[in-house]
Image (spheres, helix red, strand yellow):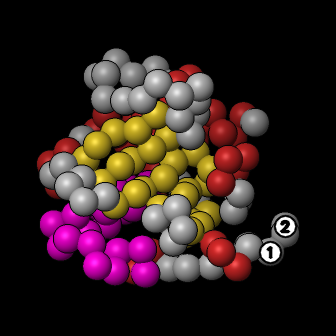
Amino acid sequence: MAPTPKAAQHTFEELLDGVEPALVKIARALRAMIVKVHPDAVETVRLGDHAATYGVGPKKMTDGYAYIMPLREYVNLGLYQGALLKDPKRLLEGTGKGLRHVKIRSLQDAVNPALRSLVAAGLALRQKG
């Protein structure tokens, strides 16, 4: 496997530096959920993108299936192939060709079982290639 680019050699804690404490708790809860779904997930933090990507390898668009992006008022949980996923609870937002996201505004939102299902489906889709 190719080495991780220098721009992506950061930690999750660095990503959370300066983020509102309530949003830090949300981001950590989302990260914990992703790790439960995919214990071997490759976490790649790019401070320039202000996001942590989770995937089967370090490449954002070809290996990643999900990302966590803390913003000012919420945390985005994004799915790189979200447009292809079944979303019976209609949580996903966005109009891009593939990318979709969910705006997480509370810890209660972060532990929604429907989010876990979306992450698992995103992982399965990425593993298919």
User: Is residue 64 depicted above or below 41 in this figure?
Assistant: above
Disc 1: which residue? 3
Whether residue 86 is visible here, answered yes or no, is yes
Number of the front mark, 2 or 1: 1
Provide the secondary structure element on which disc 2 rests: loop
- Residue 1's label in the rendered image is 2
Mark 1 neighbour class, 10 Å CA radius: few under 14, some 14 to 19, many 20 or more: few
Quarter of the image for residue 36 reads: bottom left
Between 118 and 5, the one lying in front of the other is: 5
**Residue range highlighted in magenta:** 14-34
Q: Is residue 19 magenta?
A: yes
User: Is residue 114 depicted above or below 77 in this figure?
Assistant: above
Provide the secondary structure element on which disc 1 rests: loop
Q: Residue 101: percent from the left, percent from the top? A: 40, 38
Quarter of the image that includes the C terminus: top right
Whole-angstrom CA distance, mark 2 to mark 1, is 6 Å
